[in-house]
């Protein structure tokens, strides 16, 4: 069950980043810094 939960969280993070790109908040080709994304999305490094 833990693996499924982490998969769901990673999918959620992916969708949040994708949405930011689609609405123009993050421009295509922009370097994504993991520590910045963690803070923006309120997620941990794992």
Image (cartoon, grey):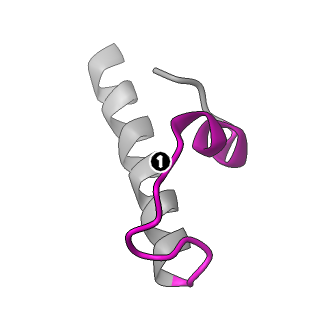
* Residue at image location 47% in from the left, 47% down from the top: 13
Q: Quadrant of residue 26?
A: bottom right
Residue 14, image x, y percentages: 40, 53
Q: Position of residue 31 (x, y in %)?
A: 46, 56
Task: Kindly give the residue lying farthest to the bottom in the view shown.
Answer: 23
Please tell me which residue lies in front, 35 or 14: 35
In the displayed structure image, the side of residue 21 where residue 11 appears, left or right: left
In percent of width and height, residue 22 lies at: 46, 81
Which residue is painted at 48% across and 74% down in the image? 21
Other residues around mark 1 within 10 Å, as few (<14) / some (14–19) / many (≥20)? some
User: Which quarter of the rendering shows the N terminus?
Assistant: top left
- In reply to whether residue 9 is colored magenta, the answer given is no
Q: Judging from the image, what secondary structure is the residue with disc 1 in?
A: helix
Q: Mark 1 highlights which residue?
A: 13
What range of the chain is rendered magenta? 23-42
Q: Is residue 30 left or right of residue 1?
A: right
């Amino acid at each position: 069950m833990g693996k499924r939960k982490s998969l769901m969280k990673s999918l959620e993070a992916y969708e949040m980043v994708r949405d930011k790109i689609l609405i123009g908040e993050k421009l295509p080709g922009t370097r994504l810094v993991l520590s910045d994304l963690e803070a923006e999305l309120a997620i941990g490094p794992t």
